[in-house]
Amino acid sequence: MLHGYLPNILDGATVTLTVALASLAIAVILGLAGAAMKLSASRVARSVATVYTTVIRGVPDLVLMLLIFYGGQLAINELAPRLGYAGYVDINPFVAGVLTISFIFGAYLTETFRGAIMAIPAGQREAGIAYGMSQWQVFARIIFPQMVRFALPGFTNNWLVLVKSTALVSVIGLSDMMSRAGHAAGATREPFTFYLTVAALYLLITGVSNLLLGMLQKRYALGVRTASL
Amino acid sequence: MLNLEVMSGSLPLYAAGTLVTLKLLAGSLLAGLALALPLSIARASPRAWLSRPVWLFTYVFRGTPLLVQLFLIYYGLAQFAWMRDSIVWPWFSSAWFCCLLAFALNTCAYTTEMLAGAIAATNHGELEAARAMGMSPVTLYRRILLPSALRRALPAYSNEVIMMLHGTSLASIVTLMDITGAARDVNSRFYLPFEAFITAAAFYLALTFILVSLFHLAERRWLVHLAPRT
């Protein structure tokens, strides 16, 4: 099937998934930090977070990815000799891809998480503090379990956009399923077949994600009463 | 620090790129919206034979990356001999047309879902009142449903327009000289990635701000009735 290229493309799919999941992990941390900064009392923290989310969300991911890939390469090679390293450093496209994607989606998740935290009544947090909980305990025991429900719809959206933007890492030379399909298309002169396969695999990933996150949403909304029209 | 000479010297290139970006954006948005209007009415219809095919179209286009869609159209279609021999081939072999087509279909899928959501969320009282007045379905859509749904979809549509502005940067991958294309050209000529891509980022940021404020104006014009009272 597919002139024997299927295992190769599937290998690429695992690269794509790894990039997506690694980026997501970092983006969630960035997003939580960003939301905490946006909601903090410190004006400096608030403005840093606002500049971060505004700039990142105002610039295409492709431009940011090229900036971090080529710019990072240059910056590291200017810095390396000063730190006593003589050789030429090649930025790993996997690292550049994951860094860029997580940096971008950290900004989107910041907004998602900020909205979710704001949806929790202030009395909840205050009650936690009144019980003598530390900041961390308030977050882990009171805020987080409740914000999941408010954050999930936005999070699902962000994750789907993140998965789709992993296709861009092929541009900076990572051999994800997109670039492997490109090679296979060149060798067999059947670009449509191979890009259609990639499209189907992406559809599978987004479809399964939708299903799983939908189940999670139901699970976290169990204790909430809803009225039907 | 940043090489300002190269940055200012390459400004004409970026200006030309901005024109390309704006043409791609306007073309794909217009075509996408024109197509999304009938599709969203079908998508919101209670008749399954109307709404299911549209759902399938939006599901596929929203579930796959724009880059894959673009490559399928630009590189993919050349696989078929009947395509290469057909009279439309001159169009499909042009990067411009393929970009416009891919972007238009992509934004059409998102816009369709957005508009269909707005149509479905129309207040039932408005529909009942319109029917009680004896409006035909066509009049009901023209006078009641669409004017209200289009307005309510405006904030979500502004997000889609920004997403599409960013999406047009993919045109640089298939050789078009848009803003990103200009930046890649400057980078490959001078090997100054920071100068090249920061200038591009500034251009996109400026366009984003302009579009956002245009939509704010539009919302103030057409959504006043939904604004919170002060």
Image (cartoon, coloured by chain):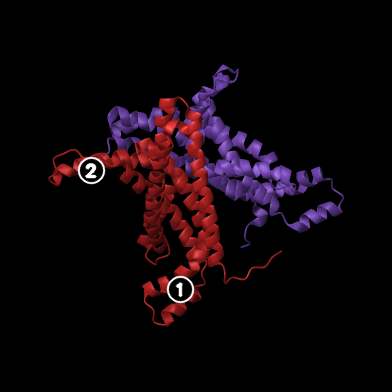
Q: In the image, residue B150 lies at what x, y percent?
A: 67, 46
> Chain B takes which shade in the image?
purple
Which residue lies under the disc numbered 2? A76
Residue drawn at x 48%, y 58% is A112
Callout 1: 10 Å neighbours few (<14), some, many (20+)?
some
Q: What's the chain of the residue with tag 1?
A: A
Question: Circle 2 sits in a helix, a strand or a loop, which is it?
Answer: helix
Q: In the image, residue B140 lies at what x, y percent?
A: 79, 47
Callout 2: 10 Å neighbours few (<14), some, many (20+)?
some
Q: Is residue B80 above or below residue A163?
A: above
Which residue lies under the disc numbered 1? A142
Q: Between residues B117 and B17, which one lies in front from this camera angle? A: B117
Estimate the spatial distance between the alpha carbons at disc 1 and disc 2, rounded to whole Å. Answer: 42 Å
A138 left or right of B157 in image? left
Give me the chain that's red.
A
Residue drawn at x 54%, y 42% is B161
Question: Circle 1 sits in a helix, a strand or a loop, which is it?
Answer: helix
